[in-house]
């Protein structure tokens, strides 16, 4: 026999802040990331833009609920979701008290063409610098999750979810520049990440040198050191250590 309670209980939701990065020419100034929004097809706030998300089923793990809602409302699947915050201020939802577990993900825009589905009339990328008014407290959520992510990039390893197993420093620098919105020195970034052990040379993983298509020069490849990456993802490093980038 299950327990029953007389006092009111809040509902639990999940929302997804998905950042889409442009794969642009590394010789150009870094473009800004976009955020994926859906246009609500049902009340409350029908017709307004919002983050993909919804209610958690009674027997559903939280991350599974976030992945399900993201796929149902935008068609995007397989994104690496990470818990980024919890929002539960009274009055945030006119339907009643709701607490939302917010997940964030970073993807390449070219790999995903969002399509509205389920109760989402549309799904569309929006620039962080030109966000529309959003339902619930979603403008606040996007602002705070963006600020927190940029802080995390300066205090923890970053980029593994976006780059292949082997990559160049230019490719890694590009990811940093897009998300931070400012230039980053490839030389200093390489020196810092090698010093703390986050990356290591990847030549041993390749039987033949890799050459640039136009210049015919060898590109030095790196890979993330998984053990150090995961340890520093937990413990972090000081912003001052990263300040010279």
Image (cartoon, rainbow, N blue to C red):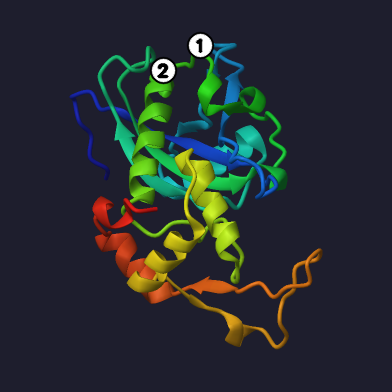
Q: Nearer the viewer, residue 159 or 63?
A: 159
> Would you name the residue on which mark 2 appears?
136
Q: Nearer the viewer, residue 20 or 45?
A: 20
Using the rendered view, name the quadrant where residue 207 is placed: bottom right
Mark 2 or 1 closer to N-term? 1
Q: Is residue 20 above or below residue 218?
A: above
Q: Residue 89 in the image: x percent, y percent?
A: 26, 22
Q: In this view, does 236 lie above or below 122?
A: below
Contact check, label 2 and label 1, Cβ < 8 Å: yes
Q: Is residue 231 above or below residue 46?
A: below
Checking the image for residue 45, the label placed there is 1
Work out whether residue 141 can be spotted. Answer: yes
Q: Say whether residue 30 is left or right of residue 5.
A: right
Q: Say whether residue 130 is left or right of residue 231.
A: right
Q: Residue 37 in the image: x percent, y percent?
A: 57, 27
Q: Residue at x 60, y 66 (%)?
A: 168
Work out whether residue 50 can be spotted. Answer: no
Secondary structure type for disc 1: loop
């Amino acid at each position: 026999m299950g327990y029953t309670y007389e006092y009111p209980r809040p509902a639990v939701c999940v929302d997804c802040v998905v950042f889409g990065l442009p794969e642009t020419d590394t010789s150009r100034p870094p473009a800004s990331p976009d955020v994926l929004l859906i246009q609500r097809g049902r009340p409350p706030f029908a017709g307004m833009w919002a983050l993909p998300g919804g209610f958690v089923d009674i027997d559903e793990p939280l991350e599974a609920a976030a992945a399900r809602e993201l796929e149902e409302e935008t068609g995007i699947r397989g994104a690496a979701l990470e818990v980024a915050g919890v929002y539960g201020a009274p009055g945030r939802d006119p339907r009643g008290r709701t607490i939302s577990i917010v997940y964030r993900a970073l993807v390449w825009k070219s790999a995903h063409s969002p399509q509205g589905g389920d109760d989402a009339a549309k799904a569309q990328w929006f620039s962080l610098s030109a966000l529309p008014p959003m339902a619930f407290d979603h403008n606040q959520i996007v602002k705070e999750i963006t600020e927190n992510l940029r802080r995390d990039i300066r205090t923890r390893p970053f980029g593994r979810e976006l780059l292949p197993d082997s990559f160049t420093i230019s490719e890694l620098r590009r990811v940093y520049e897009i998300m931070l919105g400012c230039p980053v020195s490839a030389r200093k970034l390489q020196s810092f990440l090698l010093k703390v052990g986050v990356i290591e040379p990847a030549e041993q993983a390749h039987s033949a040198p890799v050459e640039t298509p136009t210049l015919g020069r060898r590109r030095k490849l790196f890979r993330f050191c998984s053990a150090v990456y995961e340890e520093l993802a937990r413990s972090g490093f000081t912003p001052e250590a990263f300040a010279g980038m």
